[in-house]
Amino acid sequence: MSLIVLCAGGHARVVIEALLSRGMRPIAVADAARIGEVIGGVPITESDDDVLKMPADTVELANGLGNRASRSDSGLSGRRALFDRFAGQGFKFPVIAHASAVIASDAQLGDGAQVMAGAVIQPAARIGRNALVNTRAVVEHDCIVGDHAHIAPGAVLCGGVSIGEGVHVGAGAVVLVGVKVGAGAVVAAGAVVTRDVAAGGFAGNE
Ligand SMILES: CC(C)(COP(=O)(O)OP(=O)(O)OC[C@H]1O[C@@H](n2cnc3c(N)ncnc32)[C@H](O)[C@@H]1OP(=O)(O)O)[C@@H](O)C(=O)NCCC(=O)NCCS
């Protein structure tokens, strides 16, 4: 099945590397503003609208859009909207896992979940749809990562952690055993989270 990466940002290049590590070369990147360019050896040949005109069963998609979090916003709504727009039209987003990722045999990964280089996902963990477990992040046993959440590079979720939908866990953060982070919350890069975080809340490291 042919695969197209949506959106030509920095995250798209990481996605392309993960695909290449599995011997899968995307046929194209879709990004209207950059048609004619090449990223990660893959040509940008069309717009999102062009992809939407294709029969949904002839191509698979990968979400190439990343996010920039602030204290008040996980910045993940664009990545989620892109996924929902195409999934809602019947397009399939396969799980993408870099060849160097370690994923327990009984871990569950939802449609379009992405697991990047060196990440580790331990037994009975559940990773939601369109969720991103980024480079060298660790998701320990029995964790739940909600749909559209981003566990940024090097972050560690200790056992039994629950991460809500659309949460951003910043790079290098540590979420301690059993902590629950509510939907849409933001965890700062480098934070150590010892208590539950309310939906839409913020956990810093001061
Ligand atoms: C915490 C965070 C969400 C704040 O973002 P923001 O609301 O845009 O805030 P700003 O960047 O304007 O920073 C505000 C202040 O907080 C400080 N600050 C920002 N992030 C910080 C962090 N993680 N730890 C400690 N201090 C931080 C800034 O230095 C600044 O301090 P100042 O007011 O004394 O100058 C953000 O910095 C962060 O950690 N994002 C996660 C990044 C990440 O995981 N990226 C992965 C990409 S793959």
Image: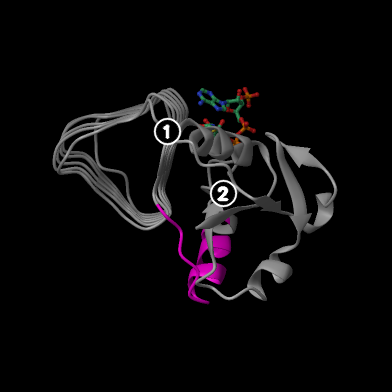
Gap in angstroms between the C-alphas marked 2 and 1? 24 Å
Q: Give the answer, above or below, for where 91 lies relative to 126.
A: below
Taking the image as shown, residue 42 lies to the left or right of residue 129, namely: right
- Furthest-right residue in view? 36
Disc 2 residue type?
A: Gly
Name the residue at 50% across, 69% down.
Answer: 91
Foreground pick, 27 / 80? 27
Q: Nearer the viewer, mark 2 or mark 1?
A: 1
Specify the segment rendered in magenta. 79-94
Residue 76 horizontal/vertical position (percent): 53, 51
Question: Looking at the rendered structure, which numbered label has been put on residue 75?
Answer: 2
Whichever of labels 2 and 1 marks the residue nearer the N terminus, that label is: 2
Taking the image as shown, residue 86 lies to the left or right of residue 205, namely: right
Residue 140 horizontal/vertical position (percent): 21, 32
Residue 15 horizontal/vertical position (percent): 54, 39
The image quadrant of residue 79 is bottom right
Residue 187 horizontal/vertical position (percent): 42, 36
Foreground pick, 97 / 181? 97
**Is residue 31 on the magenta stretch?**
no
Q: Give the answer, above or below, for where 191 lies relative to 121.
A: above
Label 2, residues with CA under 10 Å away: few <14, some 14-19, many ≥20: many
Taking the image as shown, residue 4 lies to the left or right of residue 109, namely: right
Q: Quadrant of ligand 1?
A: top right
What sort of colour scheme is used for the picture? one colour
**Is residue 85 on the magenta stretch?**
yes
Residue under circle 1?
98
Q: What element carries label 2?
A: loop
Disc 1 residue type?
A: His
